[in-house]
Image (cartoon, rainbow, N blue to C red):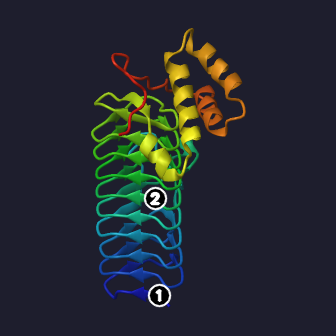
Amino acid sequence: MSSIDPTARIEKGAQIGKNVAIGPYCVIGPKVSIGDDCKLLAHVHIAGRTTIGARTSISPFASLGTLPQSVHYKGEDTALRIGEDCDIREHVTMNIGTAGGGGETVVGNKCLFMVGAHVAHDCKIGDNVTFANNATVGGHVEIGNHTFMGGLCGVHQFVRIGESVIVGGVTGVAFDVIPFTAIIGDRGTLVGINRVGLKRRGFTPAQIQSIYKAYRAIFFGPGKIEQRVAAVAEQFAADENVMRMVEFIRSMKSRRLTLPRRAGARGDSDD
């Protein structure tokens, strides 16, 4: 049985699952759907056509499903979809999508959004992603599974960030970031592979070494990058992880790749 504080305002049409706890002064719009066993602690605002997955916890002053911060939005009926088992902390904001971006902002399962994080319209956030305090991403950004976004980082619209990337604190990300890497700096540059994150995911030393060798070959080998990528694809054709790096590069869209620091770059960051 759900527990709803008498000061909460739930508009007609909202769908509330089983065993949901809605605390004081929450405001729930008419197109909102909240999954089973969710917890809205207090002062939570959920608007728009927003779906919240089961067992997600939302802290005070979070505002979800609000209008896109986009001059292209013309009032179309778009959506925000948040997965299961997420932890959304204080003052987090997430916007619905736009017609030009597919109409939906999507957040995966088991994500953690710390205080003040922002997910803009039409973003696609994978599973097990962490946004540290005040990490923000512009519209149409794609972030792969198991990626960590450092505090106060900022990501330009339309950027893609691959899986198991670590973005350093106060880092500006203007270009695509290939999987399994680490990026830092006010205008972010690669500083190697994300060894710590890969170890925590259970990657073996041999798998990590293959990723490291591929990273070095892609960015520091001879010839043009197209030639280097082709050579890596041939050499590591049986390695699923390396081939995800290759496919990420080959599927580039509107943004070019983030590159490593050249001077003194070792390509083996443990950040």
The residue type indicated by label 2 comes to Cys
| Image coords of residue 254 (percent x, y) | 53, 27
Tell which circle, 1 or 2, labels the residue nearer the N-terminal end: 1
Binning the other alpha carbons within 10 Å of mark 2 as few (below 14), some (14 to 19) or many (20 upward) gives many
The residue type indicated by label 1 comes to Ser
Residue drawn where x is 50% and y is 20% of the image: 219
Task: Answer with the quarter of the image where residue 236 lies.
Answer: top right
Q: Is residue 123 visible?
A: no
| Image coords of residue 41 (percent x, y) | 34, 76
| Image coords of residue 26 (percent x, y) | 34, 75
Residue drawn where x is 71% and y is 23% of the image: 234
Q: Which mark is residue 90?
A: none
Q: Which mark is residue 2?
A: 1
Query: In this view of the protein, which residue sits in the foreground, 138 or 49?
Result: 138
The residue to which callout 2 is attached is: 111
Q: Is the residue 257 above or below the residue 208 in the image? A: above
Residue drawn where x is 29% and y is 58% of the image: 115
Q: In this image, 120 relative to 122: left or right? A: left
Label 1 residue SS: loop
Quadrant assignment for the C terminus: top left
Query: In this view of the protein, which residue sits in the foreground, 36 or 180?
Result: 180
Name the residue furthest top.
223
| Image coords of residue 14 (percent x, y) | 50, 75
Binning the other alpha carbons within 10 Å of mark 1 as few (below 14), some (14 to 19) or many (20 upward) gives some
Task: Answer with the quarter of the image where residue 259 lies.
Answer: top left
Query: In this view of the protein, which residue sits in the foreground, 80 or 145?
Result: 145
Q: Is residue 222 visible?
A: yes
Label 1 and label 2: CA atoms lie apart by 24 Å
